[in-house]
Image: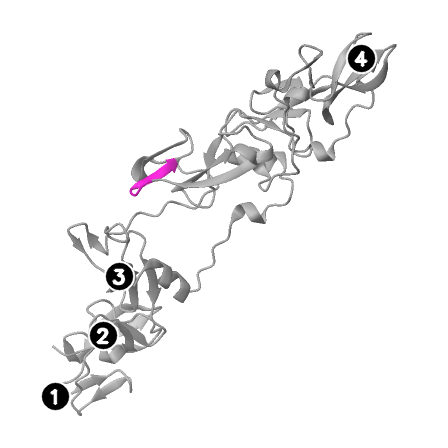
Amino acid sequence: MDKTTIRILLATTVVAWVNAESEYLSVRDICSRMPAGIFILRPNSCNNWLQCPTSPDAQDYDEGFCAYGLYFNKDSNRCDSIENVSCPFESTQTKPENRCATAKDGAFLADPENCNGFVFCANGEETRSSCPKGLLFHPSKSACVYPKEYKCPKKSENISADPICNSIATGTIFADITDCTKYHQCTNGGKLDSLQCADGQAFNHTTLKCVPRKAAVCHPLAPELQPELEVCGTEGNIRVGYIADEASCSGYYICAKEDDGKPDRKPTHLKCQNGYFFDSNTWSCRDRLNVKCNLDRCEGMDNKYVNVAGDCGAYARCKNGVTINTGKCESDYFFDERTQGCTPHKISYIACAA
């Protein structure tokens, strides 16, 4: 049985935290996932930047606004000319109505809507014009040039699919707060990649690297890292199928057959319904009296008496599912768990057989 089949049988629901987010994350949401001190672009802004707290204990955010006519470049952590920055939130912004109001008289500015066009400033007023056909306006040279001399920047696309990558630099690596063995990276186009550490490793959110599980410091928001189980055997002795958990009479693991030929280190753990114990011989949940279990048979039995493994004349008194004391019927009498009393009729339940 492969792991995919097991997951389908158990109707496991996987919730993707990214898709559950609203269109814009709050600054606190973003910084809670990021390495300390990282610079971000405030959601739904093009010129407002913030620096996340420099330590987990710090609460304050450093903040700034780019000078007029500039956008914040989240990849270089500084303000830059609008022509050089692709702002993921640009569709929500209102561009400066008149950039010539602060430009030198006679200046030529790029037309953000048209690579072939430009703006000429005279007496603080804008005059829009275009280069001859086949030429592009080069902002740095303030001149019309051939396409081979200038690459027209791509227009900002609409809000990218992932909200957190809109505000942080491309290539940023940060922890997955749902699983300590995984991490995320923002790639070109605002795409969020989910990555998995190798077997036996987990993601250390303080060093932003995968390290041996025992050395990993998980993100504070991530679930506690559970130790890898060896119930499914070793690489030289792999166990596949249904295995008693050896911690209770009703519990068992499902060890999947892994594609890489290694033991399943994350087997699914289940328990039989009340009144039934797991039978390793038949891989089934059976009436508790028809299963031999050498563990505490008071499991699931509150304030009752149960048969004792290996002696059908003995009994155990239960409280809150555990044995509190034991006793034995008179000579030639047997204890019957079903009737909760001693009887002269021979009892031969598998549960108490020698």
**Cβ–Cβ below 8 Å for labels 1 and 3?**
no
Gap in angstroms between the C-alphas marked 2 and 4: 84 Å
In the structure shown, which secondary structural element does the residue marked by tag 3 occupy?
loop
- The residue carrying mark 1 is 332
Amino acid type of the residue tagged 2 in the rendering: Thr
Stretch of the chain drawn in magenta: 198-203
CB-based contact (under 8 Å), mark 1 and mark 2: no
Q: Do we see residue 307 in this rendering?
A: yes
Q: In which quarter of the image is the N terminus?
A: bottom left
Judge by depth and name the residue closer to the eye, 299 or 41: 41
**What label sits on residue 14 in the rendered view?**
none
Taking 38 as reference, is 275 above or below it?
below
> Considering only order in the chain, which callout, 2 or 1, is on the residue closer to the N terminus?
2
Quadrant where the C terminus sits is bottom left
Dot 2 crowding, Cα within 10 Å, few <14, some 14–19, many 20+ = few
* Amino acid type assigned to the residue bearing label 1 in the image: Asp
Crowding near the residue tagged with mark 3, few <14, some 14–19, many ≥20 C-alpha atoms within 10 Å: few
Q: Tell me if mark 4 has few (under 14), some (14-19) or many (20+) residues whose alpha carbon lies within 10 angstroms of its own.
A: few
Q: 59 and 190: which one is in front?
A: 190
Residue 175 placement (x, y as % from top left): 45, 37
Which-is-in-front pick, marks 3 and 2? 2
Q: According to the image, label 2 marks what residue?
A: 282
| Residue bearing mark 3 | 247
* Position of residue 97 in the picture relative to residue 259 (left or right): right
